Image: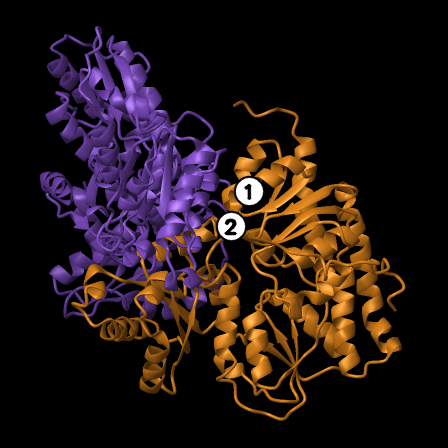
Chain colours: A orange, B purple
Amino acid sequence: MTERFTPPPSRGCSSTPVLKERGQHEVFCGLTGIIWLHRKMQDAFFLVVGSRTCAHLLQSAAGVMIFAEPRFATAILEETDLAGMADAQQELDRVVSELLERRPDIKQLFLVGSCPSEVIKLDLAKAAERMSAQFAPNVRVLSYSGSGIETTFTQGEDACLAAMVPVLPQTDARELLLVGALPDVVEEQAVGLLEAMGIGPIRILPASRVNDEYGIGPNTLYALTQPFLTETHEALQRRDANHIAAPFPFGEEGTTQWLRAIADQFGVSDAKFAEVTDAPRARATKAVAQASEALRGKSVFFFPDSQLEIPLARFLTRECGMEAVEVGAPFIHRSVMAPDLELLSEGPVIAEGQDVDKQLDRCRAARPDLTVCGLGLANPLEAEGLTTKWAIELVFTPVHFYEQAGDLAGLFSRPVRRRSLLKMEAAE
Amino acid sequence: MKLTVWTYEGPPHVGAMRVATAMKGMHYVLHAPQGDTYADLLFTMIERRNHRPPVTYTTFQARDLGADTAYLFKDAAMAAYERFKPEAMIVGASCTAELIQDDPGGLAETLGLPIPAIPLELPSYQRKENFGADETFFQIVRHLAKPVQKTARITANLIGPTALGFRHRDDITEVTALLSDMGIGVNVVAPYGARPTDIANLGAAHFNVLMYPETAETAARWMERELDLPYTKVVPIGVGATRAFVSEIASITGRNVILDESRLRMPWYSASVDSTYLTGKRVFLFGDGTHVAACARIARDEMGFEVVGMGCYNREQARMLRGVAKEFGLEALITDDYLEVERRIEELAPELILGTQMERHIGKRLGIPCAVISAPVHVQDFPARYSPQMGIEGANVIFDTWVHPLVMGLEEHLLTMFREDFEFHDDAGASHHGHKAKLRETGISEAVEPETVATQSAPTHTGPVEIVWLPAAEKELKKIPFFVRGKAKRNTETFASERGVQEISVDTLYEAKAHYAR
C-alpha cells in the first residue's frame, strides 16, 4: 500500500533542535478565524468584545470586506466601560439583547474575548453562562478567547472548537469525529471516501448547525484535519475520546496516510482501501506532478503564520521536489505534529516563535526561490526580488485531500511561474 | 459599549502609522500585542507599498503581563534604533497597551537615544484614525519645526497627505503643478515623503496649503501661530473650488496669480448635450467631511445633480458639514454607524451614491450605482494611472468617475423606449459595464406578480394608511427603467398618501408622474 511513497527519511526532523525565537511577531491574532468560522457554522454569530482595533482587523484581515450581512460584529469598549462608569456585564447584556432581537435566526452565540477584554479581566465565561440560561433553549451562548496576547491566527479556530467540546452530550457510541472547519466541498470528499470504506457514522466538529450535534465519549475516535487544533485535541482527550495520529491530509501521501490510519482503526481491508483510494490517488499524483513542475529543485522558506508550515513543508519536499531552508511555525505541538516531523527530512532550520527582523535577515541571506509569508511581508520581499506565496490563502482555499492536491501545489507554483513570465522589471 | 459591524475609521494608532509610513527616516515604536501587526497589510497590500511600514511592535503576550512589559518596550525601542537608524522616532501605545499603562514616552526618554523620541498620547477608547493622524503630525511638527529664514522666492508647504489616503499621491502632483503654474514653489510636502529634517524646515515657506483638514488642521493652526505661516481654507476639489483656491492664494501672497485652464475639460463635458440626462439626478453623498463638502458643491453646481442627502463619519468635521448641508436645505447625517447610513440611503432611494467603499457595497445590494469619493480606501482606490481629485485634472477625473456607473444618456432613452425588449431591458444594465447580459425571463414573472404585490407594499412607511399597489400598477412600475424606478415608486406613494389614496392603480401612477413632471 505504501510502496508508492518515497521512503521515509532515514533521519526526520522530530529530534532536530528547534530554534526558539522571542521577538517581534508578525502574525494575526486568533480573531481572524471568525472570517471563515462564521461561514461554516450557519446559525452562529460571533460577537467580539474588544476595541476598534479588533473591528478594524476583522474587516481588513481577509483583504476584502465581506458585505453579505456578516454574522460577526464587535462590541467596542468605550471610555465609560473602562472607567467603571458603566458595568461592563450589564452593557454586554444590553448589546446581546439588541443583537438577538435583530437576528432571531441565531442559534449559537460566541462571545469572543480580545486583548483589551482579557487585560481588564472581563469574565466572558460567566457572561456566557448567564446568557445561556436567559436565552435557552433558543440560543446557546459560549465563550472563547481570540486575543492576540493568547492566540495566533489559526489558534482562534482551535479555541472556538475547544469551547464546543465540553457542551457536547455524552455517548458510548463508536463513532468517527472529524475535527476542523473545512470548506464544504473538501469535507464532503473526506466523508465520501471514508463512507465508501464502510466507516461510519461520521460526525464533524464544528457541525454546520447546532441541531446537527452529536455525543462524545470513550468510544469516539477522532482525527484532526488541521494541525492547529491542539487545544481541541486536549479537550477531546479530557472527554476520553481517542486520537488517531497521522500526518495531515495534504497531498497524495498525507491524504493516504491519514485515511489509512483511520481505516486501520475501523478494520478496513487493504483490498477495500485500495478499491476506494486507488483512482483518486492516481489522479492526485498526476495533478501534483503537473502542478509542481516549476517547483522541482527549488528552495522554500516558511515564515510562521498559519501553523500549517510543517505539514506543507513535508508535502513540498516529498511530493513536489523542493528543498526546505527554514520552516518556521508559531508554535510546535509535538503530539499532533510528530508524524509530519518524522517524514520531513533532516536539513531545514525548524523555528518556533518569531523575531521578524532576524528572520528576515536569515531569509535574505538564504535567497530562497520561494518564501511563504504573511501579507505584511509579501510585497516588501517581492520588491527585494524574492518570490513569495502569501500564507493566508492556504487557509482560505480548499487544499486538503486528493482532489485538491494539485491545487495545493499550484498555489505554490503560480508565483514561481508568474515571475518567469513577467519580462519587465519594476521601476523603483 | 457600542455594537459595530463595519467601521469607517481604524483606531488612532493606525492614523499614527499613516503618518509614519508616509515619511522617510521616521520610525514608530508601538507598544502592542502581536495581533496589531495586521495593520502592516493595509499598507503593503491595499496601497501596494514595497516596503514594510517603519513600525516596530513590542508584541507582548499574556505571559509577559504578569512580569514586566516595560523592559519589552525599552528593548524593542533600542533594537529598532540600532537596526533602522531613524532620524527621529515616535513612540506610543495601541488600545491594549494603553490599559497596562507602561508610559512609552517616559520609557523612551530613559533610553537616552541621540535622536528625538516624540511621545504620542492617542486615547484609543475615545478617538479614531483621523484624530490619530492629525495629532501625530501635530506632535511631530511641534517637536521638530523651528522658526527659520523664509525662502527668497514665494514657496508653500503642502500639508496633510499621508499613506493610505484617498488619491493623496496624485493630489500632491496636481497641486504642485497648480502652484508651479502660478510661479510658486513647494518648500516641503509633509508628512508624505518628508524626512524629519524637512519638518524642521517647514517654517521656510511663505504659507501652507492645507490639503486635508482631517490629517493636518491642528498642525496648520500651530504653524500659523508659531511659524507665521497662514494656511489655505479652500480645498481645491472641483472647478469652482480650484478657482476659489487660486484667488485665496492671490490674497495670501498679495500677487496677481492666474489659473492655467488649458487642460480643463470638465465644464464643457458637463455642458455638452450628451450630459443632459444628468440633469436633476438625485444623489446622496457620504464620506469624510472634506470630500463630501467639496463633492456636494460639484454635484449641484458643476454636474447639475440634485443633492438629496449628505453626511460624514468623522465628528471632527460635523459642524462644518452641517453648515454646508444647511446651504442645500438638508440636514447632515453625522454617524459612523454603517447600518444607519444604509437605512438613510434606502429611505432616500437616490439614483447615484457618491460615497466610500462601504457605500459602494450598500449600492450594490440596493441596485444603486455608486462612485467612490473618499476614504476608507480599498485596493481599487490606488489605480496605476494618474488619477487626482484636486485641481484641473482632478475635476476631469471626477467627471469621468461619476458618470461611469450610470447608464449613458442615449442608452437610457432606448431602454425606456424598448423596455419590454427581451434582451435590451433594464436588468441588462449599462452596456459599458463588463458583466454577462441577462435575458428577460418571459412568462414566469407574470405568474409571480400577485405575490410580489404583498411583499412590495410591506416596507412602505407612509404613515398610518397602508398603501397597496394593485397588480396592474405593480406591473407598470416594473416597466419603468430601474434607475428611476425607486424615485417613481416613492413619488407615487407620497402622492397617494397625501391624497389618502390607499390603492395605487395605473392611473395613480401616471397622475403622480404628471404631478412631479419637470
- Callout 1 environment at 10 Å: few (<14), some (14 to 19), or many (20+)? few
- Element marked by disc 2: loop
Q: Is residue B333 left or right of residue B169?
A: left
Residue drawn at (73%, 56%) of the image: A314
Q: Marks 2/1: CA distance?
A: 55 Å
Residue drawn at (70%, 76%) of the image: A244
* Residue toward you, B515 or B384: B384
Q: Chain of mark 1?
A: A
- Where is mark 1, residue-wise? A358
Are discs 2 and 1 both within one chain?
Answer: no
* Residue B438 tag number: 2
* Residue toward you, B45 or B62: B62
Q: Is residue A129 above or below residue B354?
A: below
Q: Are marks 2 and 1 in contact (CB under 8 Å)?
A: no
Q: Quadrant of residue A177?
A: bottom right
Which residue ends up furthest to the bottom in the rendered image?
A: A172
Q: Quadrant of residue B406?
A: top left
Residue drawn at (45%, 33%) of the image: B84
The percent position of residue B12, horizontal first and vertical second, equals 29, 47
The percent position of residue B345, horizontal first and vertical second, equals 26, 52
The type of residue carrying mark 1 is Lys
Q: Chain of mark 2?
A: B
The percent position of residue B224, horizontal first and vertical second, equals 13, 25
- Asked if residue B366 shows in the view, the reply is no
The percent position of residue A40, horizontal first and vertical second, equals 52, 68
Q: Is residue A285 left or right of residue B492?
A: right
The type of residue carrying mark 2 is Lys
Q: Nearer the viewer, mark 2 or mark 1?
A: 1
Q: Is residue A390 left or right of residue B379?
A: right
